[in-house]
Image (spheres, helix red, strand yellow):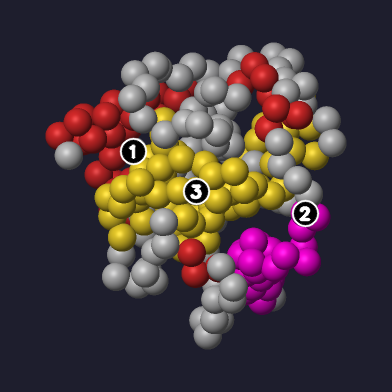
């Protein structure tokens, strides 16, 4: 009986992960609207967690982040962004490709990123520390392909649509030596207070790792 219950829970967990993956791929599960970050400056920041196992948030250094990424690019946000129930779909213009695995299709100059945090009414829902990208800012992104079930064929622009490998460590601004700081518990914040921060978390060890990797990235880019 205990074995049956264990198998049932494992099956339920697998179904949840598959449903989440398909959720990113199925436009019917989102509500689309125009996107203007400045209009959300007064949105209240709400920190939440992601589903365990979907993003890799146990990364400890740059080499590990590099190894786990399907695609690493430098560039900036384009003028096309769409807000959905569970994410923001952001068009990203590539200026340089630092890593591209052999399974990736021929990339155009622009790709799409599903950013896992989003805005809803007067709230900014931050998923596991991820802060959405700003306009007119150069970024280096560590990305992975959309996870799909075996046999699924990418449709429309899904083959050039990606997710951050990690919500904490998948995105960094370039030419920025500023160290990030923790968000203090019970601190009432709005989006305007945090919009330029690289990661949004109350956990000091996460911020310390973020700053360490950021320093390693700056070293790698300068020697590139």
189 vs 73, left or right, is: right
Is residue 56 visible in the rendered image? The answer is: no
Q: Residue at x 55, y 68 (%)?
A: 158
Quadrant of residue 140 in the image? top left
Quadrant of residue 184 in the image? top right
In the image, which residues are magenta? 3-32
Q: Residue at x 55, y 72 (%)?
A: 148
191 w.r.t. 32: above or below: above
- The mark that comes first in sequence, 2 or 3, is 2
Q: Of helix, strand and loop, which one carries label 3? A: strand
- Give the x, y percent position of residue 144: 44, 58
172 vs 87, left or right, is: left
- The mark that comes first in sequence, 2 or 1, is 2
Label 3: which residue? 92
Q: Residue at x 25, y 44 (%)?
A: 63
- Give the x, y percent position of residue 224: 17, 39
Instruction: Tell me the CA gap for discs 2 and 3.
Output: 18 Å
| In magenta segment, residue 7 | yes
- The mark that comes first in sequence, 3 or 1, is 1
Label 2: which residue? 32
- Nearest to viewer (mark 3 / mark 1): 3
Give the main secondary structure of the magenta stretch.
helix
- Give the x, y percent position of residue 189: 71, 18
Name the mark on residue 171: none
Whether tag 2 and tag 3 are in contact, CB under 8 A, the answer is no
Q: Residue at x 59, y 43 (%)?
A: 79
101 vs 108, left or right, is: left
Is residue 188 visible in the rendered image? The answer is: yes
Label 1: which residue? 60
């Amino acid at each position: 009986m205990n074995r049956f219950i264990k198998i049932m829970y494992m099956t339920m967990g697998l179904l949840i992960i598959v449903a989440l993956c398909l959720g990113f791929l199925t436009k019917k599960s989102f509500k689309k609207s125009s996107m203007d970050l400045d209009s959300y400056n007064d949105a209240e920041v709400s920190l939440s967690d992601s589903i365990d196992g979907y993003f890799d948030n146990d990364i400890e250094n740059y080499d590990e982040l590099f190894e786990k990424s399907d695609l690493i690019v430098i560039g900036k946000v384009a003028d096309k962004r769409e807000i959905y129930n569970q994410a923001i779909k952001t068009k990203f213009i590539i200026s340089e490709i630092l890593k591209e695995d052999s399974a990736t299709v021929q990339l155009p100059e622009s790709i799409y990123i599903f950013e896992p945090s989003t805005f809803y009414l007067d709230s900014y829902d931050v998923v596991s520390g991820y802060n959405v990208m700003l306009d007119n800012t150069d970024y280096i992104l560590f990305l992975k392909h959309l996870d799909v079930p075996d046999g699924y064929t990418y449709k429309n622009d899904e083959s050039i649509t990606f997710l951050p490998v990690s919500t904490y460590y998948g995105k960094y601004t370039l030419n920025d030596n500023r160290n990030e700081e923790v968000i203090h518990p019970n601190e009432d914040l709005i989006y305007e207070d945090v919009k330029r921060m690289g990661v949004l978390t109350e956990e000091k060890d996460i911020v310390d790792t973020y700053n360490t990797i950021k320093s390693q990235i700056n070293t790698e880019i300068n020697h590139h």
